[in-house]
Image (cartoon, rainbow, N blue to C red):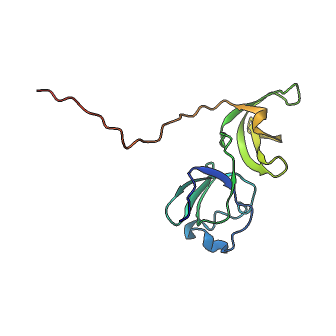
Amino acid sequence: MIGWPILPDFGIYAIWPEQGLEAFHPEDRDKIDGWIPSDHVMERFAFDGEYYHVRYGDRLSFRVKPILWNQVRDEGHRLGDQVEVLSNNMQNEAVVAKILEMRFSQVHSAIEYVLEQNLLRVDKAYLAHEFVRLTQREQLRPPDDTLTIKVPTTP
């Protein structure tokens, strides 16, 4: 039996699937041109028994059969997050920006983040240690089916 990954997880599709377009859901085949293969760090967020449901922020979502997926460590940042670039002893210009792209760097073996400031793309890509996330996300506990609440009955 195959051990299915815990979702969501993050990774890249670095090569074109052996099955070609047949690997993708018929309704999603027109969406993937230019996205696969690539170094864009995508999120697999669901599996319906046949297809993984994959997204790249709010720009792209598609369904794909289990094919070669290179998992990437989740660093906690997401497309659209607001971040503050740290000056790092004046090596970086301290700016507040938002994450525009997440791309896997073979050189650094880590995600490089392309930022956008005032609707303009920042020329330099940053690694996670070069900025702090300003966007707050709610951290919800997974549902616990064993929890029972007993309501007292009045006589």
Task: Tell me if residue 34 comes above or below residue 6 in the rendering.
Answer: below
Q: Is residue 141 left or right of residue 14?
A: left
Q: Give the number of marks.
A: 0
| Residue 62, quarter of picture | bottom right
Task: Tell me if residue 40 comes above or below residue 30 in the rendering.
Answer: above
Q: Where is residue 113 in the image (x, y as percent from the top left)?
A: 76, 43
Residue at the extreme top of the image, as rendered: 89
The structure residue drawn at horizontal position 84% and vertical position 27%, both measured from the top left corner, is: 88
Q: In this view, does 94 lie to the left or right of 53?
A: right
Depth check, front residue: 38 or 34: 38
Residue at the extreme left of the image, as rendered: 155
Task: Tell me if residue 47 comes above or below residue 135 in the rendering.
Answer: below
Depth check, front residue: 35 or 49: 49
Q: Position of residue 43 (x, y in %)?
A: 62, 51
Residue at the extreme front of the image, as rendered: 1
| Residue 33, quarter of picture | bottom right
Q: Where is residue 139 in the image (x, y as percent from the top left)?
A: 53, 35
The structure residue drawn at horizontal position 61% and vertical position 74%, both measured from the top left corner, is: 22
Q: Position of residue 37 (x, y in %)?
A: 73, 63
Task: Tell me if residue 86 comes above or below residue 98 in the rendering.
Answer: above
Depth check, front residue: 153 or 19: 153
The structure residue drawn at horizontal position 55% and vertical position 64%, both measured from the top left corner, is: 51
Quarter holding the C terminus?
A: top left
